[in-house]
């Protein structure tokens, strides 16, 4: 079974690079290399990935547990901090906010 932890993706997304993008500044003496295509150039209209971009079963990280329960219903089983559904597990923090979504169902 394939496991995918969104928390890892969110942690990677949170590591934003604040350094400005450097253009290719190859000198005239440097051997010619692969040319950068304009279609691969970064777009100013694209915003950075945010935790709100990751939604599973209609809920996102940070959602309160009462909202989660209203949105997707009662879990198959649960512990104090984890709710287990057939294809995913939800982990809550001390303030009852959704902190981690683990997808363990079919890809």
Image (spheres, grey):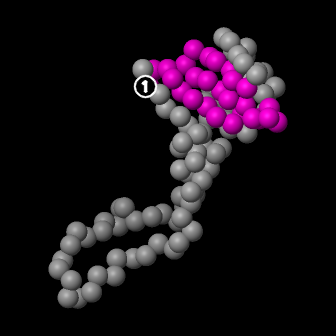
Q: Is residue 105 located in the magenta-colored stretch of the structure? A: yes
Residue placed farthest to the left in the image?
31
| Rendered location of residue 81, percent (x, y) | 73, 26
Residue extending farthest to the top is 76
Side (left or right) of 86 relative to 23: right
Q: Quadrant of residue 79?
A: top right
**Picture quadrant of residue 95:** top right
Frontmost residue, 9 versus 70: 9
The total of numbered circles placed on residues is: 1
Where does the image place residue 97, in percent across and percent down from the top left?
Answer: 77, 35
Q: Quadrant of the C terminus?
A: top left
Q: Which residue is mark 1?
A: 2
User: Residue pushed farthest bottom?
Assistant: 28
Residue at figure coordinates x 20%, y 88% from the top left: 29
Q: Which residues are magenta?
A: 81-107
49 in relation to 74, above or below:
below
Residue 37, quarter of picture: bottom left
């Amino acid at each position: 079974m394939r496991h995918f932890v969104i928390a890892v993706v969110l942690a990677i997304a949170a590591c934003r690079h604040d350094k400005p993008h450097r253009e290719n500044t190859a000198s005239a003496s440097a051997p010619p290399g692969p040319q950068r295509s304009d279609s691969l150039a970064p777009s100013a209209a694209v915003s950075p990935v945010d935790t709100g971009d990751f939604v599973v079963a209609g809920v996102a990280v940070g959602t309160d547990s009462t909202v989660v329960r209203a949105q997707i219903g009662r879990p198959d089983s649960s512990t104090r901090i984890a709710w287990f559904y057939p294809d995913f597990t939800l982990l809550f923090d001390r303030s009852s906010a959704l902190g981690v979504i683990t997808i363990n169902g079919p890809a």
